């Protein structure tokens, strides 16, 4: 099938009057400066799909339920208490139903692949399902229903704090030993669609001992490795007390951190750690909406990007699923703390939204182990902008992306993932059935 666009952001820059020939889930050929042929689907503007590098899909179901103050020192840790109470009720059907809605909403927002940092492996009391990869299979099924690309990152979780402290009761459903985890990853990998990618996710330095972390790395078999790190000040203090080093410093010193790694959050970092991550080729997995929602703090993105550091964005808690807003908030956090504008604009690319979008497409691809960007031979993951959005009137090129990121309300028109149109007119083609199943699951979860 052929698609024709008035303009398109291709791998090597903007082009006008672009025809994309799709075949086998990929972009087979690209022609620029051509008229549409009879039968071509005609659209306004094509952008590459954006990877969402960090998600806990089930948390979509508790979005909005943690916005009332529980106690005076409300912070990440009190949020986690509520999240754990919620976890206690989630079984396979709830997991799949909630994830399917989250993934459909990601596609509607312009995300075409998700990195699912998946830790709900067992029943809430810790008992095993008959199939140890049951819950991973449910995540894969949800991704297939919604039609989003999946990089599954099964989480290794073994301890409740630095230095191998025992895990708490609420964490029983997350736990594995290294052998059990290797088996789980192997069984999960066969459940993925053919363009699925599997990696591993040691949860955090709180939850994994150095010995286990070293034993774990071969399980990834060259795939992506993701870890939560330095998200909260308490975590940094605990790590200092345990090892005498800050979490990112410890990781860079002790582990073979390279371009396969994604350091999720990396919020609290010193200049030497910023330089170390940038030099390693690892991706900083930033989740601006969730980090704002949880009151985590701000990653020094300007310093990091100035040193060639790769970033990507993730919707993490899924309290709000909005690709443009992740990029907008990333920039606005920097503006508010520096009292300056266009902080994350580039020397070569002064358009702030466009520069962040492109950085997140590239960094997200590296993080999730896939090729991104619109070019012949790459996956046909394409987002079209809505011609009827007044924010796009008389805009062209990078100003379109800036207007999406900073201005528009209804920017996304259609989304193709692996060459299949999953979203049309801003709405997922199966939204009604996915939503009905979600509502049924929520009624059980919150009964
Ligand atoms: Zn997370």
Image (tube, helix red, strand yellow):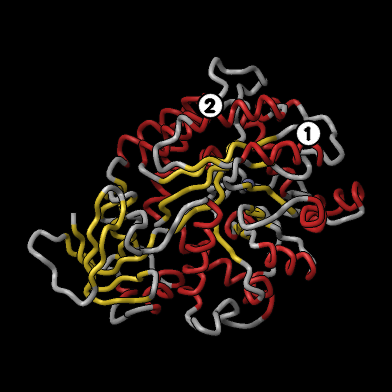
| Residue labelled with disc 1 | 159
Viewer can see residue 442: no
Neighbour tally class for label 2: few under 14, some 14-19, many 20 plus, Cα within 10 Å: some
**Residue 314 location (% of width, % of height):** 55, 54
**Residue 402 location (% of width, % of height):** 43, 75
Picture layout, residue 286 above or below residue 390: above
- Element at badge 2? helix
Q: Earlier in the sequence, mark 2 or mark 1?
A: 1
Question: Which residue sits at x=27%, y=47%?
Answer: 24
Q: Is residue 45 left or right of residue 338?
A: left
- Element at badge 1? loop
Picture layout, residue 375 above or below residue 115: below
Question: Which residue sits at x=34%, y=50%?
Answer: 417
Neighbour tally class for label 1: few under 14, some 14-19, many 20 plus, Cα within 10 Å: many
**Residue 333 location (% of width, % of height):** 63, 69
- Residue 187 is marked as 2
- Front position among marks 2 and 1: 2
Label count reads 2
Question: Which residue sits at x=72%, y=27%?
Answer: 177
Q: Is residue 16 left or right of residue 315?
A: left
């Amino acid at each position: 099938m052929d698609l024709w666009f008035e303009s398109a952001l291709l791998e090597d820059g903007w082009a006008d009057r672009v025809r994309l020939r799709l075949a086998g889930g990929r972009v087979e050929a690209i022609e620029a400066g051509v008229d549409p042929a009879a039968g071509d689907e005609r659209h306004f503007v094509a952008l590459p799909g954006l990877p969402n590098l960090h998600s806990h899909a089930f948390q979509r179901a508790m979005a909005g339920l943690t916005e009332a103050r529980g106690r005076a020192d409300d912070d990440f840790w009190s949020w986690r208490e509520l999240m754990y109470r919620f976890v206690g009720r989630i079984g396979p059907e709830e997991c799949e139903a909630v994830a399917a809605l989250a993934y459909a909403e990601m596609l509607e927002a312009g995300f075409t692949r998700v990195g699912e940092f998946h830790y709900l492996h067992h029943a809430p009391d810790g008992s095993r399902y008959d199939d140890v990869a049951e819950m991973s299979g449910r995540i894969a099924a949800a991704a297939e229903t919604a039609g989003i690309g999946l990089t599954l990152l099964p989480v290794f979780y073994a301890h409740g704090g630095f230095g191998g402290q025992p895990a708490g009761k609420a964490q029983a459903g997350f736990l594995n030993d290294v052998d059990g985890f290797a088996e789980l990853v192997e069984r999960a990998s066969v459940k993925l669609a053919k363009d699925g990618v599997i990696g591993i996710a040691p949860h955090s330095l709180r939850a994994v001992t150095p010995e286990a972390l070293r034993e774990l790395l071969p399980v990834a078999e060259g795939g992506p490795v993701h870890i939560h790190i330095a998200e909260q000040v308490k975590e940094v203090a605990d790590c200092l007390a345990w090892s005498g080093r800050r979490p990112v410093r410890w990781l860079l010193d002790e582990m073979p951190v390279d371009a396969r790694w994604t350091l999720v959050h990396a919020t609290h970092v010193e200049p030497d750690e910023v330089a170390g991550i940038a030099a390693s080729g690892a991706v900083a997995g930033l989740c601006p909406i969730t980090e704002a929602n949880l009151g985590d703090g701000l990653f020094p993105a300007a310093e990091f990007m100035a040193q060639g550091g790769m970033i990507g964005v993730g919707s993490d808690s899924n309290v709000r699923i909005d690709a443009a807003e992740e990029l907008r908030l990333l920039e606005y956090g920097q503006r508010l703390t520096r009292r300056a504008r266009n902080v994350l604009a580039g020397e070569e690319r002064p358009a702030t939204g466009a520069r962040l979008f492109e950085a997140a497409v590239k960094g997200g691809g590296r993080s999730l182990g896939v090729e991104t960007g619109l070019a012949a031979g790459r996956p046909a993951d394409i987002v079209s902008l809505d011609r009827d959005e007044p924010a796009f009137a008389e805009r062209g090129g990078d100003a379109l992306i800036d207007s999406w990121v900073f201005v528009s309300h209804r920017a996304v028109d259609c989304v193709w993932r692996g060459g299949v149109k999953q979203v049309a007119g801003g709405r997922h083609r199966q939204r009604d059935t996915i939503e009905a199943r979600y509502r049924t699951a929520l009624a059980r979860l919150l009964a």
